[in-house]
Image (cartoon, coloured by chain):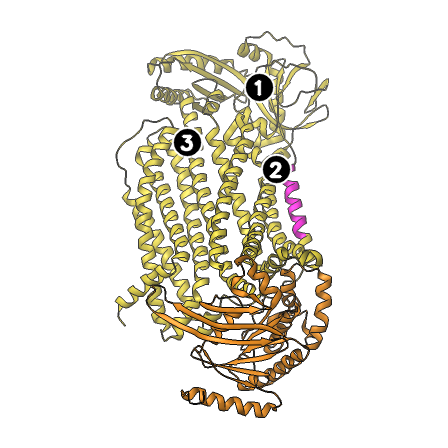
Amino acid sequence: MTLLQVQKLKKIYTTRFGGNKVQALSDVSFSVNSGDYMAIMGESGSGKTTLLNILAALDKPSGGNVLLNNDDISQIREKDISTFRRNNLGFVFQDFNLLDTFSIQDNIFLPLVLSGKKHKEMAERVVPIAKKLNIEQILDKFPYEVSGGQKQRAAVARALIAAPELVLADEPTGALDSKSSKELLNHFEEINADGQTVLMVTHSIEAASHAKRVLFIKDGKVFQELYKARRSKDEMFQEISNTLAVLSSGSDEDE
Amino acid sequence: MNNQFYMKMAAENIRKNWKMYLPFIISCISTIMMTYIIRALSTNSGLSQIPGGDNLQTILFMGYIVLMIFSAVFLFYMHSFLMKNRKREFGVYNILGMDKKHIMKMFTFEIFYVAVLSMVIGLIAGTIFNKVCILLIRYMMNASVSLGFEFSLPSVGWTLGLFTIIFILILLVTIYQIRLANPIELLKSGNVGEKEPKTKVFLSVIGFALIGVGYYLALTIQSPIQGIQLAFLAVLAVMIGTYLLFTTGSIAILKMLKANKNYYYQSNHFIPVSGMIYRMKKNAVGLSNITILSVCVIVLFSIAGSIFITSDSTAKTQYPGNFISQVSLSDDMSDTGEEIKSEMSELIDRTGYETNTSVVDYSSHAYLTIPVFETSGGFEVTRDVFFIQGNQRPSSLFLTDQENYNQFSGDNVSLDENEVYIHGVNETYNENTLTLMGQQFSVSEMSDMEEFSIGSETESEIGDIYYIIVPDMEILRQLEQQQQEILEDYSQSTIIFTQVDLGNEVSAEEEIEFGERMELNMENAGMDIVNIDTEVEAVGQMQALRSGVLFVTLNLATLLLLMTVLIIYYKQTSEAYDDKERFSIMQKVGLDRSEIKKAIKSQILIVFFLPLIVTGLHILAFSLLMKKAMVLVMLNQVDLFPIAIICAFLIFTITYVVIYRITARVYYNIVK
């Protein structure tokens, strides 16, 4: 079943005085099925972040459509957008974005509190997620008391607690050491195995090689797409490196 | 790098940090303006020529000294706020390769600019308002309006000197701080995470207890003038209690709210409660500062307001004639004072002739004042009256004999041998007998007795007052001797009180001249003078006292109000910068704009109105005590004082709400 459809997405930034126009996305189309685990790769400035912002409804496209469950994201009214985001999307950020004022548990509860859920329900929901992510011990601690890896796992728990349709991860391993990264990627794989759709933007070949699909973006266009299928992680790693090498060489001969 | 570069950079810094710098510059300008005005007024030669003007200037000069100390503390405090937000900036400069020496140079120019700017504006504004103040004082003291431009060069010099020193001190302290810090510290200062505070039950209880004790004292102290130490203790207890309660009590309450899961996990409680717990330690001190400042502002404004609404007639009604004198009787027990009386009448006639002043009427009578404690069936004379504890209430007895009373009042009172008439000003005397220093009298209440002493209106607010008529002068002098034995050097003699009414056409200057001549003549006659006064001088002094107190309190109140406003402003903006990141994260997680607005609103609401509520309670508890103290200035119109308090509180609340609206908007704009 198709969960997310991105159709001919365009984004043009205009500088304040209208002089320069920068085309961040020129023509991006792809679709994500329910249960997919997709990585989006590309160099800095390729339009990854713009794409993610539009998918997250933080930014509006200049052209094209984004359909989530056949609803057009850009048609959602301003006042409903936060509710939409809360109910359908989960976010994991590079720098965790946990709030210092809340304990880990309260950070995880935040989306539920904002949706007006009862405390009992929150307490029930957090148990299996915390167990799966191995953060049961630190639920009562504060973000400044735990390690980066733990913080990011807490952030993942926060993204999952509202049971969103789609989890968007922006460079989730960017601020972690290799051990914590590996752990986190394993968690992502497990979550995906449970049926959660994940869309991850990353620089890291290691991170991308965990995904089922890798989408390469260059100069605001889809450059190539790789499916993992039955390949092993190492093979996938190799494949991604090769593609990236082609991508950065600047030639279009493969197409 | 040359100086020009630093000058440019300093100017650019001020421009860039305008939002932070503006309140500091405003505080500099206003303190400079006010110290200049008070100093100029205290030396204004025109004012010193108004009757009572020199008294006024003494009060103003004392106010000037208070203001100097206050300005220095205030500016340091304001600047420390400013620096807290700028350390990061200095850290960046340091890392980018600016030496600390260079940073100091740049900063020196910044302070220099601020100093020059605020001194110029402050002195210009000061000169204008100085003129306004002079006119206002002249109006209040019924002096003729003086036109023309008044400019006090020595005052300019003093003000410039004082503030140059303050600015140099601020500069030195800041330089010292920059020198000590390393760049990483500078960079990180401002976003050091605060640990969640612990609940301290013990301290909360102490805080509650202290406020309770303070309130109890405030409500039970009978006389704030005699019980001044206790009154001070009450103020101190409430102040410390406020700090404790805000720091520990607020955390206890917030933790309780947090523990109530159904309350806490609601979107419009979740964010504000957690945010407040998180920085309550810092917040609480700020809140208690705001509370205490608010109380001060309201107290000062209500004093000023009550002086303003007290009419001038009080001083006049208190005054029986144009000229009064009090002369002690000699120690000779047979002296009944008749000799002094006739001598006085002779002197009054002579002085009237010498000064060419028309004397319309005069009268003399003898009376004795004894401070006592009321007991059942009489009064106790003891030295303890002079070492009184706060909750004891002394009484004053005014005694005269029937002959003097009949002379004075024109009545025809006739007493039996061991009988006295009594008149209680505050309460009637209900016993049948009266024992005083071992002597027992049968006693009758005489409600229509005329009051034969001056100044009793003030005293009746401090303690109970009884007027007593004894049968003859012999008994009066006997009582005098007895109380002298008990009170020794605190004792008083029987006094011949004389009042003189001068003709309506007699001018103020002539009245004063008459008084001075009278004094000279009485001295030459070898009289034992206790007190000499003229109505013009007394009224002038009263007015001087009032306008002096009015000006000093108004100035201090304005300054404190400004301080309160600026503390709130700085607190809100620095918190807004802290919260900016939090709210952007929450927005990403799915928090609505309108929800952000709601969360901010409820957070600011609590932070704002908690101090206001506590302020209101404090004022309520202390209003009784303040009313008792205000007798000194308001005399018999002291019942107007509650009106003044209510007005002051209302005006303050309105100002406060306006500040709330402004800072809430500033806060939202920063966070957004």
Helix, strand or loop at mark 1: loop
Q: Are marks 1 and 2 in contact (CB under 8 Å)?
A: no
Viewer-closest of B453 and A143: A143
Can residue B67 be seen in this snapshot?
Answer: yes
Residue B224's quadrant in the figure?
Answer: top right
Q: Tag 2: residue type?
A: Phe
Mark whose residue sits in front, 3 or 1: 3
Q: Main secondary structure of the magenta part?
A: helix
Q: Which residue is mark 2?
A: B387
- First reached walking from the N terminus: tag 3 or tag 1: 1
**Does the segment drawn in magenta span residue B207?**
yes
- CA separation, marks 3 and 1? 41 Å
Q: Are marks 2 and 3 in contact (CB under 8 Å)?
A: no
Helix, strand or loop at mark 3: helix
Q: Is A43 left or right of B221, judged from the image as shown?
A: left
Percent position (x, y) of residue B643? 54, 31
User: For chain B, what colour was chosen?
Assistant: yellow
* Callout 3 crowding tier (Cα within 10 Å): few <14, some 14–19, many ≥20: many
Q: Chain of mark 3?
A: B
Discs 2 and 3 share one subunit: yes
* Callout 2 crowding tier (Cα within 10 Å): few <14, some 14–19, many ≥20: few
Q: Residue at x 47, y 35 (%)?
A: B304
Q: Residue at x 48, y 65 (%)?
A: A60
Q: Which residue is mark 1?
A: B333
Mark whose residue sits in front, 2 or 3: 3
Percent position (x, y) of residue B69? 43, 50
- CA separation, marks 2 and 3? 31 Å
Discs 3 and 1 share one subunit: yes
Percent position (x, y) of residue B295? 54, 43
Magenta span: B206-221
Chain letter, orange? A
